[in-house]
Amino acid sequence: MELDRVEGLPVAKWYTHGVFRSRLCLVVCAATMGATLLNPVTASALPVTEASTPAGPITTVTEVPDRESLWAAAEQGSRVEVTDERTETNTVWVNPDGTVTSDTSLEPIRVRKDDAWVPVDLDLEHLATGWAPKASANPVVFSSGGDGPAAKLSDGTKRLWLNWTKTLPAPSVSGASATYALDANTDLVLTAVSEGFEGSWS
C-alpha cells in the first residue's frame, strides 16, 4: 500500500485494482457529501395565485329545482322557490335557515300552458271559437255573436253550456268581460273568473 492524492485528497492506493476503486469511491463520495452539507440548496417558493372574482353583479336566484334550492337559499340569504313542487294553487319555498314554507291559494294562481306554468290571465282574447281567457284553470269560451251558446265551459271531462234562444250581437270586450247589448235597455255581461264564468244583467 502507498499514499497517493486524488484532487488534493490523500487516498490509500491498493495494488489490488478492485479494492482501490472502492476506496477511491468512498473518499470522493464523502468529499461530495461534505460539500453538499456546507452549501445547502434553498428551495424557491412557488408563486400563489389568488382565485379570481367573477366580474359583474351577482344575480339573486328566485327559483330552482328541488335538488338545488337548499344550497341557493343559504348561499344568498333569501328564500328560493322549489319549482318542482308547483301546482295551480301551491308554492313551496326553501328559507335560508333550511325550513320550508308553503303558500296555498284558494283559487288557481297559475296554469299549465304549452308544457309550462304561466300566471292566470283572465283577460279575453279572440279565437276562432269565440272569446276566451288567455290563461285559465277552467277554460271558458264566450260567443262572438250569432246563434248558439252564449258560453261554453269545459274541464276536460265535463261541459257546461249557457244556451241562448235568440241571436246574440257581437260583444263589447273589456278585460275579462264580454258585454252583449240585447236591446236598448238590457245588457248581458259574461265575465271570466277563476272557477269558470259569471253572468249578470245591466
Image (cartoon, grey):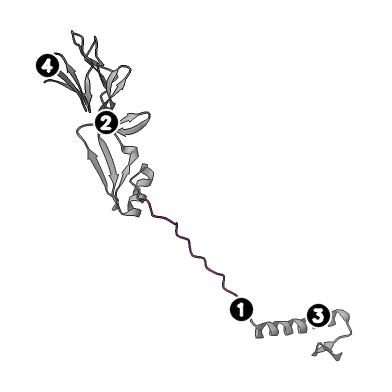
Relative depth, front residue between 12 and 104 = 104
Relative depth, front residue between 40 and 31 = 40
Disc nearest the viewer among 2 and 4: 4
Which residue is label 2 attached to?
121
Question: x, y (%) of residue 23?
Answer: 80, 83
* Mark 3 or mark 1: whose residue is earlier in sequence: 3
Q: Are marks 3 and 2 in contact (CB under 8 Å)?
A: no
Which element type, helix, strand or loop, lies under badge 3? helix
Mark number for residue 186? 4
Q: Are marks 4 and 1 in contact (CB under 8 Å)?
A: no
Report, in whole angstroms, how far the alpha carbon at label 3 lies from the one at label 4: 126 Å
Which residue is label 3 attached to?
22
Q: Residue at x 33, y 46 (%)?
A: 62
* Mark 1 or mark 2: whose residue is earlier in sequence: 1
Report, in whole angstroms, how far the alpha carbon at label 3 lies from the one at label 1: 32 Å
User: Is 55 colored magenta in this rendering?
Assistant: yes
Which element type, helix, strand or loop, lies under badge 4? loop
Relative depth, front residue between 64 and 39 = 64
Which residue is label 1 attached to?
42
Question: x, y (%) of residue 191?
Answer: 19, 24
Q: Which residues are magenta?
A: 42-59
Q: Is residue 90 above or below residue 10?
A: above
